[in-house]
Image (cartoon, grey):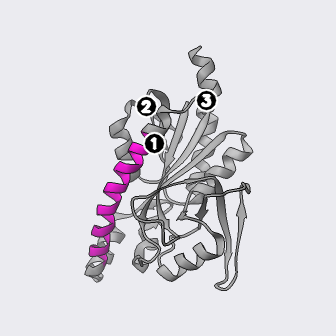
Amino acid sequence: MIAILVAVRQELKPILRRADTDLVVRQEHLDFHEGTLGGQPVALLALGIGKECARIAAEMTIHCYRPDLVISAGFGGGLQPDVQAGDIVVGTEILDLRKDQGSRITWDSTHKPVRPDRIMTTDEMVLRAENKARIGKATGALSVDMETSAVAAVCAARKTDFLAVRCITDNVDENLPDEFNDFFVLGQLRAKRVISSCARDPRVLADLARLGYRAKHSGDKLARFLQAAVEQLHLPALAARDA
């Protein structure tokens, strides 16, 4: 069993279109889509935005399914000039932002490989281009999101294999509207807050439309990548089951 955890439905839907998942199983408050992807048994879940949602969902996933591999996947912001919208980032080192004091940034790391491709996890969306560039320069991270480090920490504690995959939706030199972090409550997008913000400032609507277009193409690309990657996996437990 391979578990693929994403944050929101916009990331999950393109994967579901490529998967054979007719069964939806509710575990506590989480709806898992069970079936196959690329010929492999999978459980797919949209867990919500943020580290606390990710931690709870990862714990529940491992408790209920005991997966051979957990993949934390979804959209991410670019932190380097050579990482562009639509690029796929596979994280081999996961960073968790501890403190950002402007001139000094501290973080924790799950491990320190010789040649890391780093993904940074933060408590809030990094909205300003200057902050993305500053964090990228200080840490060497390629992408930023709000869930990966929490899933990685749970998998490490439960001795479960883990993989992080992100598809870039906003470049390092692009600002996002300041209102974006207010759109989410307890990890879920609140449509009323989005509508209210767009009514106050129509420019937010234009930004949302641009990101929505990016998200559609990034979601399709991420789904294709995950399907191809899963098809090529040969995990020991899966090999033993098929023998």
Q: Quadrant of residue 38?
A: top left
Nearer the observer, 32 or 4:
4
Q: Is residue 207 rendered magenta in the image? A: yes
Quadrant position of residue 16: top left
Q: Report the magenta residues as a range.
A: 204-227
Q: Which mark is residue 226?
A: 1
SS state under label 2:
loop
Residue 32 shows up from this direction: no
**Disc with the residue nearer the chain's start (2 vs 3):** 2
- 56 in relation to 190, above or below: above
Front one among 117 and 154: 117
Bin the neighbour count of mark 1 within 10 Å (Cα to Cα): few under 14, some 14-19, many 20 and up: some
Q: Amino acid at mark 2?
A: Gly
Callouts 1 and 2 close, C-beta under 8 Å? yes
Q: Amino acid at mark 3?
A: Leu
Q: Which residue position holds label 3?
A: 235
